[in-house]
Amino acid sequence: MTILRQTQKKFGSRAVMVGIVVGFGLILTGFKPHGKGLVLGTLFSVINFVLMGEMLSMRLAGNRKTASLRAFSSICLRYALLAVPLIAAVKLESIHILGVVFGLFMIQLLLIVDGLGKFNPFLKR
């Protein structure tokens, strides 16, 4: 599980760093609700990513029925967690929903960028 923790730390810290820098840039350029939404969504995205990794071993333990129930419970818990910043964006005018959505997909965006960065057909391996 050390590889899992290293991956979580690598992408979690990168996501928070990118979210804060871009969010701060948005705030400085006059898009304060967008910046706040981006930071909020990014934080919840990182929490979701860590929870997913932590619950992975729990879902694999036990018989099939128990593992299926744990997997379903994990998904429901993480979806409820991801709904919190979306609900806050809908209820509060100080948080823009578009920023939250981009923040919620920050980990996925960084995973794609990292994968594309490693893919270079011109390099010989």
Image (tube, grey):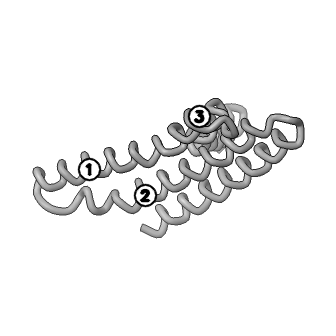
Crowd rating for badge 2 (residues with CA inside 10 Å; few <14, some 14–19, many 20+): some
Disc on the earlier residue, 3 or 1: 1
Furthest-bottom residue in this view: 2
x%, y% of residue 78?
39, 48
- SS for tag 1? helix
**Marks 3 and 2, Cα distance to the nearest angstrom?**
19 Å
Residue 75: x and y in percent read 33, 45
Percent x, y of residue 116:
64, 36
Residue position for label 1: 73
Q: Which amino acid type is shown beneath numbered disc 2?
A: Leu
Of callouts 3 and 2, the N-terminal one: 2
- Check the picture and name the quadrant holding the N terminus: bottom left
Q: Residue at x 60, y 44 (%)?
A: 41
Badge 3 is on which residue? 101
**Residue 71 visible from this viewpoint:** yes
Q: Nearer the viewer, residue 102 or 36?
A: 36
Residue sitting nearer the eye, 7 or 78? 78
Q: Is residue 115 visible?
A: no
